[in-house]
Image: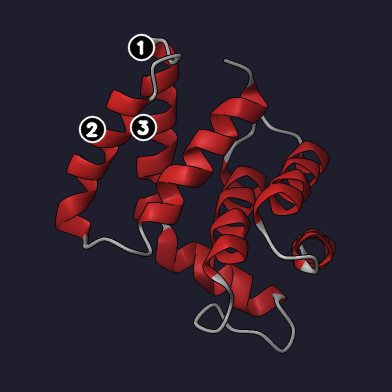
Amino acid sequence: MGRSELREHIFRMLFRVEFHEAKELPEQLKLYFEQLEEAEPADQAYIQAKYEKIAAEKEQLDEKINACATGWKTSRMNKVDLTILRLAVYEIMEDEDIPTGVAINEAVELAKKYSSEDGPSFINGVLGRMVKEA
């Protein structure tokens, strides 16, 4: 599985965080992998590890997003955009294997696929501001 496809699966798992209690998430992860037939064990391990790291840092990621999203708070953002931002901010701040430009571009591509018409420009603006202020 390629990096973009892995990222999309991580996004889908992170999106579930918004709709399930924390105690349900291990079961949700198990169910997701049961439906994910094309994933090799190494891919599943990568998806699970990154998902767990991002979920564990949700509050810190939200603080960073709130600081960079002018006029918006994470509590008011649509859940798709918020999930994409959490993934991208994590990749920019914590994942040294992923160049910043790639993380931003991949986030915009996810927004084009899953978000509203304004989503890609919103995502790009928030991430651009974050990188500028860093």
Q: Around disc 2, counting alpha carbons within 10 Å, would you say few (fewer than 14), some (14 to 19), or many (20 or more)?
A: few
Image vertical order of residue 76 relative to residue 1, above or below? below
- Residue 16: x %, y % from top left: 37, 54
- Residue 124: x %, y % from top left: 81, 60
Point out which mark residue 98 bears: none
Q: Earlier in the sequence, mark 3 or mark 1?
A: 1
Give me the residue at 41% from left, 10% from top: 40
Give me the residue at 50% from left, 35% from top: 9
What separation in Å lies between label 3 and label 1 (alpha carbons)?
A: 10 Å
Q: Around disc 1, counting alpha carbons within 10 Å, would you say few (fewer than 14), some (14 to 19), or many (20 or more)?
A: few
- Residue 24: x %, y % from top left: 17, 52
Q: Quadrant of residue 85?
A: bottom right
The kind of residue tagged 2 is: Lys
Say which element carries label 2. Answer: helix
Q: Which residue is mark 1?
A: 41
Say which element carries label 3. Answer: helix
Name the side, left or right, on which 117 lies relative to 26.
right
Q: Which residue is mark 3?
A: 48
What separation in Å lies between label 3 and label 2 (alpha carbons)?
A: 10 Å
Q: Which residue is mark 2?
A: 30
The kind of residue tagged 3 is: Gln
- Residue 79: x %, y % from top left: 52, 67
Image vertical order of residue 125 relative to residue 29, above or below? below
